[in-house]
Amino acid sequence: MKNNALAGKTIVITGASSGVGRAAALEFAPYDVKLVLAARNEVALDELAGECGVLGSDALVVVTDVTDPKALINLVNAANDWQGKIDVWINNAGVLAAGEFDKTPIEVHAQVIETNMLGYINGTHAVMPVFKKQQKGILINNISIGGFLPVPYGAGYTASKFGLRGFSEAIKAELSSWPDIHICDLFPAFLDTPGIVHAANYTEKALKPAPPVYDPRRVARAMVKITLNPRSNTYVGSASSLLKLSHNLFPQLTAKITGSVMRRYFKSADPMVSTNGNLFNTVNYGMSAIGSFGRPGKPGAHHKYLALGVLAGLAAGVYLLNSKK
């Protein structure tokens, strides 16, 4: 038992089968909470529920597709029927799709937006009546730095994350008269999760996350801290804040450089057959919390230096551009 302040709280996590969602469940489990685990992969959820039980928390598995509004209502009802309350709701389910915009099927762009943005909206819409009836609740949105930083060759993903940030800001304003209902947004930098191997990929190249890559357990720990002390916005990893700053200061240059970096990567990346990944259906591989692209544990100081290097490079680029005028 780590902290009695969390004991007995009912916590719903969407996208719990792998990545950050799975890491969050395992991070909360030693606190004797009541976990409601939601995703499309029932086998992975059952396995996770068993692990959470060993760590000290009961878990309820609810197979859920967040693109279906009725499924989210069912999730709310299942959690509420089980414990009579919902203390924390974590919007986390997400998918990735990479490829040139016009060469990526339009249904792929639509599905990314359905999952990443409308999935969060569906969840928020379903749980909000419970929070208002209770007159309290914490809703955590795992948005990512992609809510500020555009991702070339991921236009649908960028649209979903930018839209999600705007949606959350609107809901925060709307709920300003409800002091005990908290909307908390998380903006982690690039994470070492299986999400990138689950991604729909139309680049015909193997994908890797851009460095610096952070351990998803850092995001999970941030979720625990937010549950104890709600905050409107949390940036996970120094690179997150610095990348946001670089885009605020040099938006056009940042976009050009990110596009250039990706094109350079594609030239040397290993070839790969196009795939829909887990976009339309769940998959049976890579259901761990951590991927295989970083180093487990806390990121070292070198991550800060890498991020500062990006910012310094952008500043130098602006200087050079201005000096030629």
Image (cartoon, rainbow, N blue to C red):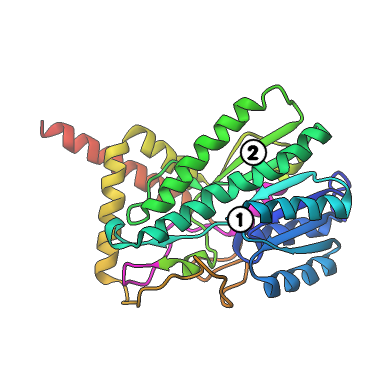
User: Quarter of the image holding residue 31?
Assistant: bottom right
Residue visible at 36% across and 73% down? 274
Disc 1: which residue: 68
Q: Which residues are magenta?
A: 201-224
Label 2: few (<14), some (14–19) or many (≥20) C-alpha neighbours in 10 Å: many
Is 10 rendered above or below residue 278?
Answer: above
In this picture, residue 145 sits left or right of residue 233: left
Is 23 colored magenta in this rendering? no
Disc 2: which residue: 184
Q: Quadrant of the image for the C terminus?
A: top left
Question: SS at mark 2?
Answer: strand
- Outermost residue, front side: 70
Q: Position of residue 15 (x, y in %)?
A: 63, 59
Q: Please tell me which residue lies in front, 107 or 285.
A: 107
Q: Position of residue 276 (x, y in %)?
A: 43, 70
Mark 1–mark 2 contact, CB under 8 Å? no
Label 1: few (<14), some (14–19) or many (≥20) C-alpha neighbours in 10 Å: some
- Outermost residue, left side: 325
Residue visible at 61% across and 53% down? 92
Q: Which mark is residue 13?
A: none
Is 56 rendered above or below residue 221?
Answer: below
Residue visible at 46% across and 66% down? 199
Q: Earlier in the sequence, mark 1 or mark 2?
A: 1
In this picture, residue 247 sits left or right of residue 253: right
Q: Position of residue 187 (x, y in %)?
A: 54, 44
